[in-house]
């Protein structure tokens, strides 16, 4: 397994270089260093000299990919791409275009993002699986039909509606939690309750239907019939046998997203005033801050690769027949 | 179920701290003199040499003390001393530096010397840079330092004239981007050369001590006096002295932040300002909230004792003579979305709020006479409305370099100017056609309708670039744009579409068809507005052009491309706006000054408008003090502009601000950024009303619990029955 993991990690290097190159190309197709300078310096009273100075100080006055006037390795290294990308492979993200340490910003914002994403993920998983099992338990009854219909309705509604509706009902009308905001430590509880509840409700429809499908597929298999024939209760059949055997497809969708929880949620963080990484990324895109955008894309790619590796490893845990070679 | 019960228990536990369940602030803050407000975007810069945006000045204007400020109550806007003990004296000198009388004509003045006397014994905010041993920090010293408040030891010192001079030198610091470096380089004697000197010096490694390099145009006379020498006469210079660019900057602060390990911790002057104003930045987490706390050493200012007529009755003079600031702390919370902001305001968790379009109908009702007042729902909560016309203008410009909508008659230009004019835009007949076309469009585009539909009536139609409140603006019949409006029954009435069509026909486009080519006339409008949200606005503007049979082609583009087109002059029409830097007509009319054209000179004249007669009047007017003579010149200049119509003058937005009853001394003042120090909150009243408005509703929790329990019991019974049946 170790050899497999090392191989996967080595595979990640060209993938990350490719992601970096793609981000770089996409960003600079849309924005030029001059545009970035103008965005940072504002509209009023900006002189061409100020733009040149801004670019020079941040290294955006260099050629993009190839420095034709340089010699030797400098042809490649004395470029914007190299200067802005190489250090990221040792997780040195440098400074944003407004002069703030990106590494420090990420470490500060990761906590609030996780405070929302982790409980939403864990409690959500519990709720979705439980609801799916419940529908499976009462399959082909009125409860199942109502449950499925409810799932379809819930998954048809925009996430924004849940946020605004939740804020209106729970915060504005019933005054149970603050509408938005965040505080550190134990004080964070009252701020994260609503985003978590909204996040869970928003995901019930699609997730529960998906899990229900998986469970229904499992429940028709021979080992379930055997378990029933042995006189096991329906609850025991579901929770001990069906759930365990349905873990592989569940893990495929679940484990891969665990590392990405660090990246936060764009919409939720924006509406609930959560100072997480989701809002950091969107702010950087709006501000055309390439330093932050490439750092966040790189981090996202790394975490996704980690998620995929973890998924593979998790298969060996839930199914002893699986071997990583 | 267990996790739900746990969550419920925790929620109940948090309620046990005695606070309201939905209170976003710590329970300890209850009853304190704190102002709660919000910011929508984190400020980019907090270094007074670099900051220039409104959202940056919201903080800096309270943290720093430049020599001057705008009187909070008096109108028209008037400069008064802030850190200065009196208004700066100005001496005029000829080119040999001999004194000139104050009445001398501006063209004889070679230099103006501003002598500024600052108040003695003003002190800086508490800061570790004022503690001597914090100037040589080692890595070990910084090991536990994450934020500025981690430095337990702080100090202060007296503000000196040298600190003001130091900041003026910083305006051209090679590592800083000062937006006004170019403008100031033209005026402050020696500043341009000083920039080159510092640039050369910055090539040496290490800390650049700008005090080692003298600047000829500034001089420290003694601890409380300094002089600034500028080229020629520039009365607007006094307005710049009211901006944070001219605040004091202690040299040791720069050295403190330049130490190794500081930048990695985001400890920079651009993030942790150090000033001598009424507040200091005590918490800076722009991802969540920023807090300004009263500077304990600020004791140099009291509430103004006089204002304008009606201020006494309005209650604006209730705190006369009290030491400023009146509020101990200001909490700015990051609120990116308007809906949470608005709802928190209604719950009493923000003390004041603007009004978004979504909330307008809920907040404001407009009477038949057009008067805006708060709705009954707001009245019940004791919310009041303050309105004021902004010193800004939103306009649609024509590109003077375009042969269809722009261009001068070559005969009106000087021989030198003629040399650079293309034949197709220098033709007198085509210039006249373009003028009539612009006038026709100006009549057709009904900005009164625009304001009513898209701004909820929050604005007034512009008659020229100069908004109300700025010298040169004229009310009534004398102030209307007679090329677009007639004066009827005491109000301006937009001219008829028939009149616009007549002008269009005279321009050579009868019914919107080019009489020569028989092709329909198509005008291109460049804008950054796109998407569904802006569709109605774009449809509306197309409809305006349809009224005279002209086709409008809207070219929506992103911000970068739009700016690029403007820079290259690759537009016919475009949307733009301008906020005043200072309340002087020069700050608006320079947007149409020929030598400041965007394409040729890279200036702020985005229309590239060029009329030698207007330029002459502008140059004559710009250095004059406000007087009837200056007004007469402005009137002539405006007449030229209205006739030429290089812009659709658009509108001047109106600001609507709602405030709760516990907030006092809120008088709209568009120019002053340091208003918060005059405001007062009645914290006890706020606590009482918040408690009344935010009582938690327990029944949904109880109902949810009961329903879940019943469902659980029912399910258990069904399952049991099913098992029993097997």
Image (cartoon, grey):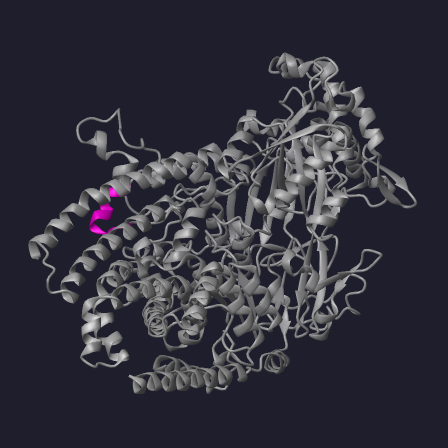
As drawn, is B310 to the left or to the right of A124? right
Determine which quarter of the picture holds residue B692: bottom right
Determine which quarter of the picture holds residue A212: bottom left
Q: Is residue A67 visible?
A: yes
Q: Position of residue B647 (x, y in %)?
A: 69, 33
As drawn, is A76 to the left or to the right of B309? left
Relative to residue A307, is residue B405 depicted above or below?
above
- x 73%, y 72%: residue: B379
What residue range appears in magenta? A84-93
Determine which quarter of the picture holds residue B305: bottom right
As drawn, is B357 to the left or to the right of B696? right
- x 50%, y 80%: residue: B21
Relative to residue A263, is residue B241 depicted above or below?
above
Q: Position of residue B721 (x, y in %)?
A: 35, 86
Q: Is residue B471 visible?
A: no
As drawn, is A228 to the left or to the right of B526? left
Dominant SS type (magenta): helix
Quadrant containing the N terminus of chain A is bottom left
Any magenta on residue B445? no
Point out the residue furthest to the right here: B489
Any magenta on residue A87? yes
- x 29%, y 67%: residue: A215
Q: Position of residue A89 (x, y in %)?
A: 21, 47
What number of labels is visible?
0
Near-viewer residue (B597 or A278): A278
Q: Position of residue B191 (x, y in %)?
A: 49, 38
Near-viewer residue (B132 or B97): B132
Near-viewer residue (B339 or B658): B339
């Amino acid at each position: 397994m170790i050899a497999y993991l090392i191989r996967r990690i080595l595979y990640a290097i060209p993938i990350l270089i490719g992601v970096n190159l793609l981000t770089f190309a996409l960003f600079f197709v849309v924005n030029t260093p001059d545009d970035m300078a103008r965005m940072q310096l504002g509209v009023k009273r900006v002189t061409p000299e100020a733009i040149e100075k801004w670019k020079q100080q941040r290294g955006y006055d260099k050629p993009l990919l190839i420095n034709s006037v340089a010699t030797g390795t400098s042809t490649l290294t004395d470029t914007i791409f190299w200067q802005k990308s190489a250090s990221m492979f040792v997780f040195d993200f440098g400074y944003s275009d407004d002069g703030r340490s990106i590494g420090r910003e990420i470490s500060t914002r990761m906590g609030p993002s996780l405070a929302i994403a982790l409980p939403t993920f864990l409690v959500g998983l519990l709720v979705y699986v439980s609801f799916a099992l419940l529908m499976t338990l009462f399959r082909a009854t009125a409860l199942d039909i109502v449950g499925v219909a409810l799932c379809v309705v819930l998954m048809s509604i925009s996430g924004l509606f849940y946020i605004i509706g939740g804020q209106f009902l729970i915060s504005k009308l019933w005054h149970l939690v603050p509408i938005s905001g965040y505080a550190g430590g134990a004080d964070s509880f009252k701020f994260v309750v609503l985003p978590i509840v909204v996040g869970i409700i928003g995901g019930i429809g699609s997730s529960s239907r998906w899990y229900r499908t998986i469970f229904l597929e499992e429940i028709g298999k021979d080992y379930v019939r055997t378990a029933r024939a042995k006189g096991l209760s329906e609850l025991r059949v579901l929770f001990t046998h069906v759930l365990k055997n349905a873990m592989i497809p569940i893990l495929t969708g679940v484990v891969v997203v665990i590392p990405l929880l660090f990246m936060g949620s764009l919409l939720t963080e924006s509406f609930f005033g959560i100072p997480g990484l989701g809002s950091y990324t969107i702010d950087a895109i709006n501000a055309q801050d390439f330093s932050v955008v490439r750092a966040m894309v790189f981090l996202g790619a790394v975490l996704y690769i980690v998620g995929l590796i973890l998924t593979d490893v998790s298969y060996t845990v839930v199914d002893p027949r699986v071997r990583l070679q | 179920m267990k996790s739900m019960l746990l969550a419920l228990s925790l929620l109940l536990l948090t309620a046990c701290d005695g606070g309201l369940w939905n209170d976003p602030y710590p329970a300890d803050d209850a009853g304190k003199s704190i102002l709660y407000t919000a910011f929508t975007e984190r400020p980019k810069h907090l270094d007074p040499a670099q900051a220039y945006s409104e959202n940056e000045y919201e903080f800096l204007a309270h943290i720093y003390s430049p020599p001057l400020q705008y009187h909070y109550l008096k109108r028209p806007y008037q400069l008064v001393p802030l850190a200065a003990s009196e208004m700066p004296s100005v001496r005029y000198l000829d080119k040999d530096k001999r004194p000139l009388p104050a009445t001398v004509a501006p063209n004889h003045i070679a230099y103006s010397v501003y002598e500024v006397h600052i108040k003695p014994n003003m002190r800086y905010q508490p800061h570790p840079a004022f503690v001597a041993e914090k100037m040589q920090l080692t890595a070990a010293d910084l090991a536990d330092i994450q934020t500025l408040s981690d430095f337990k030891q702080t100090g202060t010192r007296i503000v000196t004239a040298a600190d003001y001079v130091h900041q003026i030198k910083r305006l051209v610091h090679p590592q800083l981007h000062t937006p006004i470096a170019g403008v100031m380089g033209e005026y402050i004697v020696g500043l341009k050369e000083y920039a080159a000197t510092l640039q050369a010096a910055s090539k040496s490694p290490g800390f650049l001590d700008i005090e080692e390099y003298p600047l000829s145009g500034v001089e420290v006379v003694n601890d409380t006096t300094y002089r600034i020498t500028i080229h020629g006469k520039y009365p607007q210079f006094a307005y710049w002295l009211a901006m944070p660019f001219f605040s004091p900057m202690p040299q040791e602060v720069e050295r403190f932040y330049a130490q190794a390990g500081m930048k990695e911790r985001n400890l920079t002057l651009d993030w942790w300002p150090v000033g001598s104003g009424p507040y200091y930045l005590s918490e800076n987490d722009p991802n969540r909230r920023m807090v300004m706390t009263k500077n304990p050493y600020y004791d140099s200012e009291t509430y103004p004792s006089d204002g304008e007529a009606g201020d006494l009755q309005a209650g604006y003079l209730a705190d006369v003579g009290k030491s400023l600031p009146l509020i101990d702390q200001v909490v700015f919370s990051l609120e990116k979305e308007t809906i949470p902001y608005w709802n928190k305001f209604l719950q009493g968790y923000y003390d004041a709020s603007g009004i978004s379009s979504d909330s307008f109908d809920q907040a404001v009702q407009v009477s038949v006479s057009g008067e805006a007042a708060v709705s009954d729902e707001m009245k019940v909560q004791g919310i009041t409305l303050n309105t004021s016309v902004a010193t800004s203008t939103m306009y649609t410009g024509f590109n003077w370099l375009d042969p269809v909508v722009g261009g001068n008659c070559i005969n009106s230009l000087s021989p030198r100017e003629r040399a650079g004019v293309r034949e197709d835009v220098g033709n007198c007949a085509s210039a006249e056609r373009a003028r009539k076309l612009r006038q026709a469009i100006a009549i057709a585009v009904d900005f009164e309708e625009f304001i009513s539909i898209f701004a909820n009536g929050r604005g007034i139609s512009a008659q020229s670039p100069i908004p109300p409140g700025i010298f040169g603006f004229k009310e009534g019949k004398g102030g209307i744009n007679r090329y677009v409006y007639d004066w009827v029954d005491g109000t301006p009435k937009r001219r008829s579409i028939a009149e616009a069509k007549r002008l269009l026909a005279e321009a050579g486009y009868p019914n919107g068809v080019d009489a020569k080519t028989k092709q329909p006339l198509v005008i291109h409008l460049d804008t950054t507005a796109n998407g569904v949200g802006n569709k109605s606005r774009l449809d509306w503007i197309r409809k305006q052009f349809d009224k005279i049979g002209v086709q409008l082609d809207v070219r929506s583009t992103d911000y970068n491309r739009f700016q690029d087109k403007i820079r290259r002059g690759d537009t016919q029409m475009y949307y733009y706006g301008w906020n005043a830097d200072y309340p002087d007509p020069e700050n608006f009319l320079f947007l149409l000054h020929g030598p400041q054209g965007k394409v040729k000179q890279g200036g702020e004249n985005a229309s590239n408008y060029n009329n030698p007669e207007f330029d002459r009047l502008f140059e004559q007017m710009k250095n004059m003090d406000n007087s009837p003579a200056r007004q007469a010149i402005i009137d002539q200049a405006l007449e030229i502009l209205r006739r030429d119509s290089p812009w659709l003058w658009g509108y001047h937005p109106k600001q609507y601000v709602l405030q709760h009853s516990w907030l006092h001394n809120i008088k709209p003042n568009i120019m002053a950024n340091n208003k918060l120090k005059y405001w007062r909150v009645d914290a006890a009243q706020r606590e009482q009303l918040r408690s009344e408005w935010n009582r938690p509703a327990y029944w949904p929790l109880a109902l949810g619990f009961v329903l879940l329990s019943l469902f659980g019991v029912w399910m258990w019974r069904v399952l049991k029955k099913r098992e029993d049946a097997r």
